[in-house]
Image: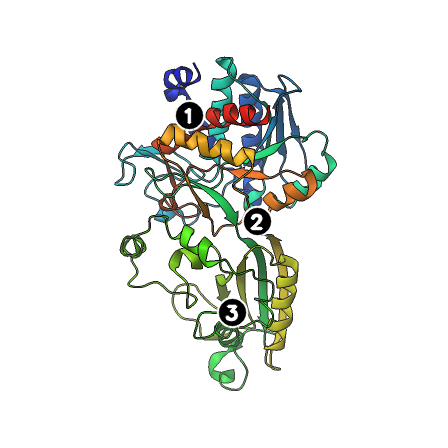
């Protein structure tokens, strides 16, 4: 009956998703503050409409958290569904082929059935909305086999700075047996997979200061250090010729993945030529001794995410800048501690700074890596659910991304998380023309009810 309900309501589900996506809930930009709240209100209304109870909007020091629940029997297992309704900025707007907050469906080579193009279509509005519609279908078909609690935040894209405080203050409210999250993906639409590993994150901003003001590059050039030149050299020194990171003790706590596990990872289908073609690059680059899929999942990294200073407007301005800046992210593997890595980076970066500049390092957000076991009931329930809807056994994979709240859930709530995502790497999340396939959206709605049924059977 659940599947019949889904089939009858597909068009409405999609139209509701469009209304949700149209709200520009950009958490990083204060000018969208009212829109973020509007998105929270949309969820509140939709949760009430579909039959959830105790629907509340909890204010925080930033953007609010939306909570709801449906307790049908305290003897049944409880699933805590997490998602985020905030999105990345759409800039640069001129690189979008359509309005980033005006969702449209277009067919692509990978999505011949069509995909929704819009900011947040995949990350994470489309994926979290699958859970609301799956719940609606189960509840209205009298096939809800578990209790459900929903917790949706509006600050994931800016570090979830208020989520931990909320979780620690509401342990009893959030009491459950497992956390279910759809903010990851699958290998492709014919090869299902379940994410069983995430990298941690240390994110910092650096500032290099030379003279006390911008200077005329003709009068002062060659006599005073240029902070942009200095910063460039400092950044270049952070990697050696083998692609490893030149920070003392950076790899000290890295747990090497066994050859057996690496062989299992290698079973995932991957075409290097297609990978390079998709990115319009002539070759890949990274740490020696590891494959592309290993470099972006089981190895730590250090990357510059943005760099600026001096004059970058039209035309020429011969200026020697007073300051230069960069934003740097370090993806960490399980057992590396984000605070320790941040401290190691700061000490090293200040140590390598020449005496003719001053350096400031400002830590931003971070989080720990995690590995999810594949032998506990919730994973088996997800595995069997995907086998039912895809007709294939999903491959356990490790992701290069970071979801810092996953280890926090385990620490504070004592709960493991199942990462049941349906996006694709080609959905270009965080970039112009982000999209989410119709196949993936509806496949998620169809698969989630099977997870609930399987989980209840395994836990009772």
Q: Specify few, some or many for label 3: CA neighbours under 10 Å numbering under 14, 14-19, or 20 or more.
A: some
Q: CA distance from mark 1 to mark 2?
A: 27 Å
Quarter of the figure with the C terminus: top right
Q: Identify which residue is drawn at 54% across, 56% down.
A: 333
Q: Specify few, some or many for label 2: CA neighbours under 10 Å numbering under 14, 14-19, or 20 or more.
A: many
**Closest to the observer: 260 or 338?**
260
Q: Identify which residue is drawn at 48% across, 33% down.
A: 382
Residue wearing tag 1: 446
In the image, residue 298 lies at what x, y percent?
Answer: 48, 56
Residue wearing tag 3: 245
Q: Secondary structure at mark 1?
A: helix
| Residue 218 image label | none
Q: Is residue 213 above or below residue 25?
A: below
Q: CA distance from mark 3 to mark 2?
A: 21 Å
Q: Secondary structure at mark 3?
A: loop
In the image, residue 150 lies at what x, y percent?
Answer: 59, 29
Place residue 37 in its image quadrant: top right
> In this rendering, which labeled residue sits more in front, label 3 or label 2?
2
Q: Is residue 79 above or below residue 143?
A: below
**Closest to the observer: 250 or 202?**
250
Place residue 348 in its image quadrant: bottom right
Q: Secondary structure at mark 2?
A: strand
**Closest to the observer: 263 or 279?**
263
- Whether tag 3 and tag 2 are in contact, CB under 8 A, the answer is no
In the image, residue 61 lies at what x, y percent?
Answer: 69, 41
Q: Identify which residue is drawn at 56% across, 22% down.
A: 47
Q: Is residue 90 above or below residue 214?
A: above
First-in-chain label (1 vs 2) = 2
Residue wearing tag 2: 370
């Amino acid at each position: 009956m659940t599947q019949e309900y889904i089939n009858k309501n597909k068009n409405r589900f999609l139209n509701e998703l469009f209304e949700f996506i149209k709200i520009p809930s950009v958490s990083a930009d204060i000018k969208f503050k009212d829109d973020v709240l509007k998105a929270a209100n949309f969820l509140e209304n939709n949760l009430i409409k579909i039959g959830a109870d105790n629907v509340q909007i909890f204010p925080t020091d930033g953007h609010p958290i939306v909570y709801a629940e449906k307790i049908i029997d305290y003897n049944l297992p409880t699933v805590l569904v997490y998602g985020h309704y905030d999105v990345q900025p759409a800039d640069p707007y001129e690189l979008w082929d359509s309005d980033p907050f005006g969702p449209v469906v277009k067919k692509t080579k990978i999505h011949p059935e069509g995909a929704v193009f819009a900011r947040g279509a995949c990350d994470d509005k489309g994926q979290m909305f699958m859970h609301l519609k799956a719940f609606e279908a189960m509840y209205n078909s009298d096939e809800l086999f578990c209790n459900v609690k929903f917790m949706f935040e509006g600050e994931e894209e800016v570090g979830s700075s208020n989520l931990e405080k909320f979780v620690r203050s509401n342990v009893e409210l959030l009491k459950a047996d497992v956390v279910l999250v759809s903010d990851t993906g699958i290998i492709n639409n014919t090869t299902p997979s379940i994410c069983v590993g995430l990298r941690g994150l240390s994110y910092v901003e650096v500032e290099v200061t030379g003279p006390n003001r911008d200077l005329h590059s003709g009068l002062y050039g060659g006599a005073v250090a240029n902070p942009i030149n200095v910063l460039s050299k400092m950044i270049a020194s952070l990697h050696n010729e083998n692609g490893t990171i030149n920070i003392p003790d950076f790899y000290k706590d890295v747990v090497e993945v066994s050859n057996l596990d690496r062989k299992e990872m290698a079973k995932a289908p991957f075409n290097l030529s297609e990978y390079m073609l998709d990115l319009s690059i002539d070759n890949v680059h990274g740490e020696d001794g590891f494959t592309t899929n290993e470099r972006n999942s089981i190895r730590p990294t250090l990357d510059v995410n943005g760099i600026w200073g001096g004059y970058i407007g039209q035309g020429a301005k011969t200026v020697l800048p007073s300051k230069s800046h960069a934003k740097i992210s370090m993806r960490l593997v399980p057992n590396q501690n984000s605070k320790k890595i941040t401290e190691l980076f700061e000490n090293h970066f200040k140590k390598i700074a020449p005496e003719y500049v001053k350096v400031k390092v400002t830590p931003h957000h971070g989080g720990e890596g995690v590995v999810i076991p594949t032998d506990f009931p919730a994973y088996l329930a997800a595995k069997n659910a995907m086998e039912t809807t895809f007709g294939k056994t999903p491959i356990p994979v490790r992701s290069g991304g970071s979801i810092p709240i996953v280890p926090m859930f385990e620490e504070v709530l004592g709960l493991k998380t199942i990462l049941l995502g349906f996006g694709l790497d080609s959905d270009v999340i965080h970039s112009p023309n982000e999209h989410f396939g119709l196949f993936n959206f509806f496949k998620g709605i169809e698969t989630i009810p099977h997870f609930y049924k399987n989980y209840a059977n395994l836990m009772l």
